Amino acid sequence: MSVRAPDVANRIVLDEKEMPTRWYNIQADLPFPGSPPLHPGTRQPIGPQDLAPLFPMELIKQEVSQERYIDIPQPVQEALRLWRPTPLMRATRLERELKTTAKIYYKYEGVSPPGSHKPNTAVAQAFYNKAEGTKRLATETGAGQWGSALAFAARIFDLECMVYMVRISYEQKPYRKSMMQVWGATVVPSPSELTNAGRKIRAEHPDSTGSLGIAISEAVEDAATRDDTKYSLGSVLNHVLMHQTIIGEEAMVQMERAGAMPDLVVGCVGGGSNFSGLAFPFLRDRLQGKTRTRFLAVEPDACPSITRGKYTYDFGDTGEMTPLVKMHTLGHGFIPDGIHAGGLRYHGMAPLVSALVDHGFIDGVAYPQRTVFDAAVQFARTEGTIPAPESAHAIRAVIDEAVKARERGESPVILFNLSGHGLLDLAAYDAYFAGTLSDVALSETRIKELVGAL
Amino acid sequence: MSVRAPDVANRIVLDEKEMPTRWYNIQADLPFPGSPPLHPGTRQPIGPQDLAPLFPMELIKQEVSQERYIDIPQPVQEALRLWRPTPLMRATRLERELKTTAKIYYKYEGVSPPGSHKPNTAVAQAFYNKAEGTKRLATETGAGQWGSALAFAARIFDLECMVYMVRISYEQKPYRKSMMQVWGATVVPSPSELTNAGRKIRAEHPDSTGSLGIAISEAVEDAATRDDTKYSLGSVLNHVLMHQTIIGEEAMVQMERAGAMPDLVVGCVGGGSNFSGLAFPFLRDRLQGKTRTRFLAVEPDACPSITRGKYTYDFGDTGEMTPLVKMHTLGHGFIPDGIHAGGLRYHGMAPLVSALVDHGFIDGVAYPQRTVFDAAVQFARTEGTIPAPESAHAIRAVIDEAVKARERGESPVILFNLSGHGLLDLAAYDAYFAGTLSDVALSETRIKELVGAL
């Protein structure tokens, strides 16, 4: 027949027995000293006991560990096997449409029940908490990806789960809230009346639609003031990034099986965890001088912490309750505009990613919203999967790199993280097609003002 | 550590090279004669030319083929590999919660880009149409699963796609419509002003919220009156059921690998295609006397065609434009109540399924809506995945069978089709938690009235 064949998908799957059994801790391989977190009161380096009210001791140890590999506990492995290993795909139909000489591969994390990479760390955190006697977890969520992942993980290990959800998302994204409720979590809009941090904001700004920084303050206060409760964070921290390295460890095996190792690794960055999860195992070889792989972190123009922020000590939350960490930041009081990639609206960046950017191992690039959705729709119409707006930032950068490769006559192997699907973000696609998406970007004046205040 | 391990998931995946390369055509093995479709005008058996305005010749041939196996064309295989083979899972966490002695396995079709089994036939239909010169496909959709699958498939083979979407779903489920638009389809609410069938209904009932029967009439009229357009149906027809047998062929390999063959195979039924796709390859062995496997088709109390309908010739649509087929039916004028399992609201049942029920090879059971959602939530809280309301009908029956097995001290192997996820059905879960779901069921009087009129 005369119909042209869509190219072979080159879908590379691993058997559950091939799932990695240990995490990679990049702290063991850094060629520069780390910068310790500082106590919010004394501004002196914090010790394990300072964090004990918030986290189980095993996670505190992982946060500062210098061990290169840490075994994944058996119960965590078994929970991960509900959806892992995840597939690696060759994007042959996208390649053809772009007429590119580049080879494009992506690791697809959207197959997890909550639809993103977030449960990779959520199940680990729930497990260590359960093992140390925690009864209840408190956390914050913006767009809802992290809250739903923790709700799912808490249910697996029989923990209660309390989610402070940024009020504007609570109202605009009711289905993420529904998802959390299906898994049995309690979800309240933040700022709430349940914490001092929340009440203070509401007294000053009764109409506050909330922010991630405020919700973090609420969840931290909840955990710090209840004996049965600990706090869980979905990105930024060293142990969270480490739990995500299972993505890259699987991808290395799959790329080897495909007979192609990446020249360029790409991921979107909000707090930095999905990017790090894919990139760190490949960075291991680069740090050891074995490869010259490039690493590209993609962020939104509306919240450009890596490309425009200052590398300095700052708080993780609005309420100044968390330790100060050295990171690329736009300031802990900064509230970005309401772009649809809610998971990329955080004022700072993971300290490990920030340090690697500062030392030249990772590059950053920022894009405005509409061009990101152009890429998202192009991807959906070739590869099928409708990407999350966050993940579409990575796709935008990959398409641009693939077109550049064609123009230069180069044939690089590009690998990116498709960190989640967009099935709960279809309202954003509606806005895109209706032409009502705006390209929010920070002005030079505003950036100078933000950075100058740090 | 003292945390109990969640059981091993027993996730059985196949490599893309192991994907079946032919469909199983159960018509070759039926131990009874088939009942031919009748022309709506003459009431005489129809010939291929009667169907030619609606379908490409290759699908018409498949509809009546007596070949046991039909090769899957290479371009269709390559499109299927965007998400296939799909995983087979052992539901160990559900088994433990039920304290059952049964072993429960499920085939998970929700990993496709549109989130259900529907694209298995959509890509095949789009391919054969493209090969025979069709430029545009017209179809109907209720809840939107089928429409989104055809939109996705049409995009793969560069065809235009026109979807008549039941008006109440168009208004209540805007995100399914968004999905179709991401893949480039045109979606209109039905009844519409674009067809005679639609205009007639709107003239008589200006406030009509539509039905699947009406939308079929519109799509058939669209295709019959335009040279560039053919019609696509997402269930009921023999060739559609055959395209779905890739599910069961994969599952047979996976069950063999798990070392367990099913004593009971379960699926939900609307038109019958996901059930048949899983069941027919296992029925092959039963029809040949090699096994005594039981087959259970699960339907809603609100639309109980198998369990309460009449086995007789009836139209497939409200407008009496389609051929008459012999099937279990509640009458082509019947419009079921608006339950959330929109995919199970069809007045009839696939002729092949109906004949196998009539000859005692398949059993039927019907459930009310709330008990189905009880099962859906229990499943999501143990296995993680949030099921589509349609698929949850199968889960309800499986849980009941597993509890019975425990009570009887039996250890059957149960296999069911988790035909799709419920991420676009979270409003239905909200209604369940809010206690506003009603257990709509047809009264005895109404059933007598419906069946008496046939």
Image (cartoon, coloured by chain):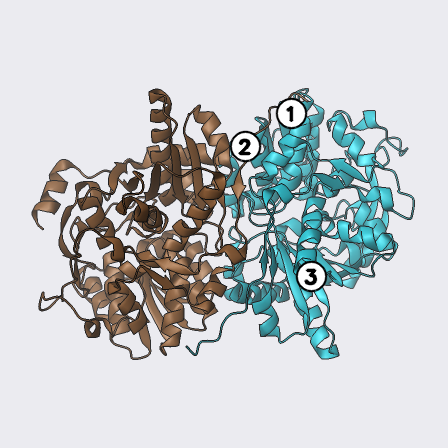
Chain colours: A brown, B cyan
For disc 3, the marked residue is: B259
User: Which structural element holds mark 3?
Assistant: loop
In primary-sequence order, the first of circles 1 and 3 is 1
Name which quarter of the figure residue B261 lies in.
Answer: bottom right
The chain to which mark 3 is attached is: B
Which labelled disc corresponds to residue B185?
A: 2
Quadrant of the drawing holding the N terminus of chain A: top right
Amino acid at circle 1 = Lys
Res. B454 visible in picture: no
In the displayed structure, A253 sits above or below A102; it is below
Q: Residue at 46% x, 63% y: name it.
A: A77
In the displayed structure, B277 sits above or below A441; it is below
For disc 1, the marked residue is: B130
Q: Position of residue A330 (x, y in %)?
A: 17, 48
Q: Are marks 1 and 2 in contact (CB under 8 Å)?
A: no
The chain to which mark 1 is attached is: B
In primary-sequence order, the first of circles 2 and 3 is 2
Which labelled disc corresponds to residue B338?
A: none
Callout in the foreground (1, 2):
1
Observer-nearest of A210 and B396: B396
User: Which structural element holds mark 2?
Assistant: loop
User: Which structural element holds mark 1?
Assistant: helix
In the displayed structure image, the side of residue A339 where residue B42 appears, left or right:
right
In the displayed structure, B251 sits above or below A202; it is above
Q: Position of residue A121 (x, y in %)?
A: 38, 60
Q: Are marks 1 and 3 on the same chain?
A: yes
